[in-house]
Amino acid sequence: MSPHAHPGVSPADLEPDVTAEVEALYSDGITARKGAFASDWADRLREDIDAAFREAMARPGGAVGRGPHRYYVEIHPEQLRGFVELVDHPWVRSVCAAVLGPDYRIVELGFDVPLEGAVNQPWHRDFPMPEETRAERRLTSLAFNVTAVDTEEDMGPFEIAPGTQWDDSPEFGHGMFPPRPHYPRYEERAVRKYPQRGDISARTALTIHRGTKNNSAKSRPVLVLGVDGPEATNGDRHDTAVTRTYWESLPERVRRHLDCPIVDELEPITQKHTIEGLVMGDA
């Protein structure tokens, strides 16, 4: 068994074997599966994101800024036609179980949209380091990203500094934002990602990263699927829900991991996962 795999989870129990992915998450902080979905699946994802984005931008609190011309929107699973295919993909299930254990919980579904004019974000992680990670060097949550477009250089690619998920300093603003004197370390390590439609990545949101400047006239929407292990509390910041009818239509294997209220009628989500340090972008 990999020394990083969750206790009680053997690679032999998982299909496919994701030993290499677990090692990558603990060493680099990110891994990916190329071509996990067909391009037409990604095109439907784009249609659903575009519809949800228009709806969210038309009402107060529907979207939250993550920097100039950059937005985050949380949605309900029913707003995404490919939700079941995503969360029940064998690679996604195996990575979740291997890193977080068999009782992992799906707690977030949303998307980021950098528009034309989006600027470099400050280097950051998405939340402060949990004590389990600090004390035991153990990951307790994962973020899966699925691009809805073929990423090009001028579209403001996602940039990540591999291996920085363990960085821990009292100088980090709010436990998330390294001070500017630390920037050369991240710039030296920085890797830009150019996922194509159908690709999916998994990362720990603790790895220092940023969105870069969008020099094109195109948007670069990216789906975000957040998954917690039993100890993590990221679900407290999210309001995903499902209707009873939809819940009953889901496979039991999906219901077992979907941690959200079951309601008679969905309410539009008012965004509350604000990351204040991203609002102004990087000067």
Image: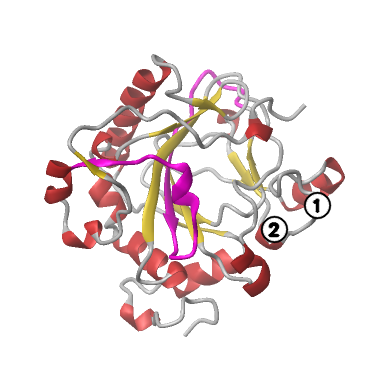
Residue farthest to the right, as pictured: 181
Q: Residue 80, how many percent across, how many down?
A: 27, 37
Query: Residue at 34% of width from left, 19% of height from top?
Result: 55
Q: Residue 136, how many percent across, how many down?
A: 63, 74
89 over 216 or under it: above or below: below
Label pair 1/2, CB-CB below 8 angstroms: yes
Residue 144 visible in the current orientation: no
Query: Residue at 64% of width from left, 46% of height from top?
Result: 209
- The answer to whether 94 appears left or right of 245 in the picture is right
User: Quick one: 203 or 136, which is closer to the camera?
Assistant: 136
Residue farthest to the bottom, as pictured: 1
Classify 10 Å Cα crowding around label 2: few (below 14), some (14-19), many (20 and above): some
User: Quick one: 269 or 196, which is closer to the camera?
Assistant: 269
Q: Which residue is mark 2?
A: 164
Classify 10 Å Cα crowding around label 1: few (below 14), some (14-19), many (20 and above): few
Q: Quadrant of residue 213?
A: top right
Quarter of the rendering occupied by the C terminus: top right
Image mark for residue 266: none
Query: Residue at 49% of width from left, 22% of height from top?
Result: 218
Q: Amino acid at mark 1?
A: Arg
Part of the protein shown in magenta:
214-243
122 over 251 or under it: above or below: above
Q: Which residue is mark 1?
A: 185
User: Quick one: 195 or 182, which is closer to the camera?
Assistant: 182
Query: Residue at 48% of width from left, 67% of height from top?
Result: 21
Q: Residue 188, how many percent across, how many down?
A: 78, 50
Distance between the Cα atoms at labels 1 and 2?
Answer: 9 Å
Residue 214 visible in the current orientation: yes
Could you say whether the residue bearing mark 1 is in a helix, strand or loop? helix
Q: Would residue 241 be counted in the magenta stretch?
A: yes
